[in-house]
Image (cartoon, helix red, strand yellow):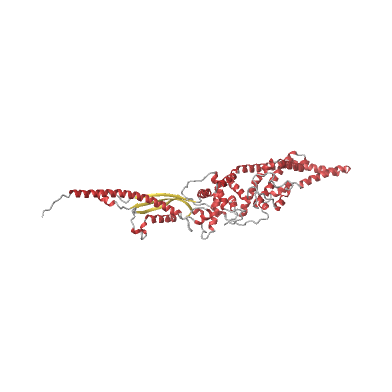
């Protein structure tokens, strides 16, 4: 049988060429796969960060709309414990073959986690509660309408005017006290001279009619001194304002231990600086409105954990409800005194009435400077008495306009000396004006923002500790942002053929990924 013989050179060539092309394709595929694995490692790191912060404290969110991860979780704060939880999340996504079903599938990435760590973290209390401030403002921006914000800004913009009038009142009060004190010696000399004259006239039996007349002048002077409303106001100023305006009210006896509060403690600090998204007047106003919405006050009648008068604590920072209310009442009184005094000195009717009474009280002494100083003292005292009534009305849940006029002014000069009786009888409440809560807003705008942040965190910590199973909660353990780093190694899949054919060498590539996330 004859057989045909064929040369195999072309077949061998094509086989070698196919191997080379296949090796090249494997190399390209492996390169693309490695880049995909690198992208996947970035995704896994990001997912791990999101998963970690998704374990926020739900009760804190429910009560105060604040996101944070409890870094203590019922024990002591250890960032290593939090890091272990982060590693668990990453490991689950890095090695999807853990499950029985997944072990039957092909994992193209072949990633292996070599190491991971939380390199930096931010706490709720960092920078005097700045993270708390940022979250509160974000919440309020999403929940306060434009019209409501405009009204809040009007109150905030009135702060400068209010402070100016307070300063003017205090300056006038100090100046008038100095004038009255300086004229006291001359006044006493005049009174002694009148008494001496009256005594001489009384001993002159030959001129009994004149003696009777002078004795009548002296008696008149004594009567005027006894009926001087400034005497009653001077006594009233020595008493506690809180007792005057709340004489028939039952006050809370609750208290806290200040040295155990975050605002009075040396707190741990995080190492991550978060970008401040909110700042400025609008943000400050919104933060203070957050305080008004989430913390009760004296008039609201709500009870709270630790303290009942919580807005008053944010303003005063005292250990007891009573002392915090006392602080706020004194601030309200000064605020009203400044505004009322500004109206009294500008009103002609009130000036005329005060001038007439001053003349009646001191005109017989013949000291014009004393009469003028007494007139001014009466206006100051009148403003003080009206302010006591204003504060009483506010504590009763009524409203008082920021700037008074003739219609809204309630205390007459005749009743100035018996203002205590007027307070006990109860002042007529007006429908127009600002409520106690709105005056609290004004006081917040006039106060220290850093103090308000930390005192609010004091109250939050106290409230959270009152929840079941959270007696060890501390705001200084609340993590609000993290920065992480993770290193992965990528196993080889298509590189073996390329390495054998092309003579290439190389180990398993490694990637280091970083990520950051904050609430």
| Residue 380 in the image, given as x and y percentages of width and height | 69, 44
| Residue 103 in the image, given as x and y percentages of width and height | 34, 59
- Is residue 134 or residue 409 the one in the foreground? 409
Residue lying furthest front in this view? 1
Residue lying furthest top in this view? 368
| Residue 228 in the image, given as x and y percentages of width and height | 75, 46
Q: Specify whether 493 is left or right of 352.
A: left
Q: How many marks?
A: 0
Q: Specify whether 151 is left or right of 45.
A: right
Q: In which quarter of the image is residue 166?
A: top right
Residue lying furthest right in this view? 206
Residue 264 visible to an observer of this rendering: no
| Residue 509 in the image, given as x and y percentages of width and height | 33, 50
Q: Specify whether 279 is left or right of 242.
A: left
Quadrant where the image shows the N terminus: bottom left
Residue 104 visible to an observer of this rendering: yes
């Amino acid at each position: 049988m004859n057989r045909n013989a064929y040369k195999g050179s072309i077949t061998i060539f094509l086989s070698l060429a196919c191997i080379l092309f296949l090796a090249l394709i494997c190399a390209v595929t492996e390169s693309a796969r490695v880049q995909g694995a690198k992208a996947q490692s970035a995704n896994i790191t990001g997912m791990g960060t999101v998963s970690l912060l998704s374990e926020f404290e739900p009760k804190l969110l429910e009560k105060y709309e604040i996101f944070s991860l409890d870094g203590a979780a019922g024990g002591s704060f250890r960032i290593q414990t939090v890091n272990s939880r982060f590693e668990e999340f990453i490991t689950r996504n890095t090695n999807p073959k853990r499950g029985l079903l997944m072990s039957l599938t092909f994992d193209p990435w072949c990633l292996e986690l070599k190491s991971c760590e939380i390199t930096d973290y931010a706490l709720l209390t960092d920078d005097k509660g700045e993270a708390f401030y940022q979250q509160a403002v974000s919440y309020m921006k999403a929940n306060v309408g434009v019209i409501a914000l405009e009204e809040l800004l009007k109150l905030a913009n009135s702060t400068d005017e209010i402070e100016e009038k307070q300063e003017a009142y205090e300056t006038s009060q100090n100046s008038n006290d100095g004038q009255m004190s300086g004229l006291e010696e001359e006044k006493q000399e005049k009174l002694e001279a009148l008494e001496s004259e009256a005594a001489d006239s009384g001993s002159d039996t030959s001129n009994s009619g004149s003696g009777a007349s002078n004795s009548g002048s002296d008696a008149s002077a004594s009567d005027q001194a006894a009926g001087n409303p400034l005497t009653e106001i001077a006594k009233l100023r020595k008493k506690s304002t809180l007792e005057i305006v709340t004489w028939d009210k039952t006050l809370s006896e609750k208290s806290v231990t200040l040295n155990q509060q975050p605002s009075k403690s040396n707190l741990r600090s995080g190492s991550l600086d978060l970008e401040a998204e909110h700042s400025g007047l609008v943000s400050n106003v919104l933060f203070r409105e957050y305080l008004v919405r989430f913390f009760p006050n004296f008039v609201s009648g709500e009870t709270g954990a630790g303290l009942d008068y919580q807005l008053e604590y944010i303003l005063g920072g005292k250990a007891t409800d009573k002392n915090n209310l006392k602080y706020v009442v004194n601030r309200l009184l000064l605020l009203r005194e400044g505004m009322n005094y500004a109206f009294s000195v500008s009103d002609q009717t009130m000036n005329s009435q005060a001038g007439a009474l001053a003349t009646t009280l001191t005109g017989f002494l013949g000291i014009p400077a004393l009469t003028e100083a007494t007139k001014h003292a009466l206006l100051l005292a009148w403003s003080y008495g009206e302010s006591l009534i204003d504060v009483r009305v506010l504590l009763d849940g009524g409203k008082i306009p920021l700037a008074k006029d003739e219609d809204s002014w309630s205390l007459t000069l005749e009743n100035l000396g018996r203002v205590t009786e007027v307070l006990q009888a109860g002042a007529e409440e007006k429908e127009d004006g600002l409520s106690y809560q709105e005056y609290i807003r004004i006081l917040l705008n006039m106060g220290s923002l850093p103090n308000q942040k930390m005192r609010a965190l004091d109250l939050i910590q106290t409230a959270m500790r009152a929840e079941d199973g959270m007696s060890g909660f501390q705001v200084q353990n609340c993590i609000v942002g993290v920065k992480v780093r993770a290193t992965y190694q990528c196993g080889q899949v298509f590189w073996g053929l390329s390495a054998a054919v092309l003579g290439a060498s190389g180990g398993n590539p490694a990637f280091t990924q970083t990520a950051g996330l904050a609430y």
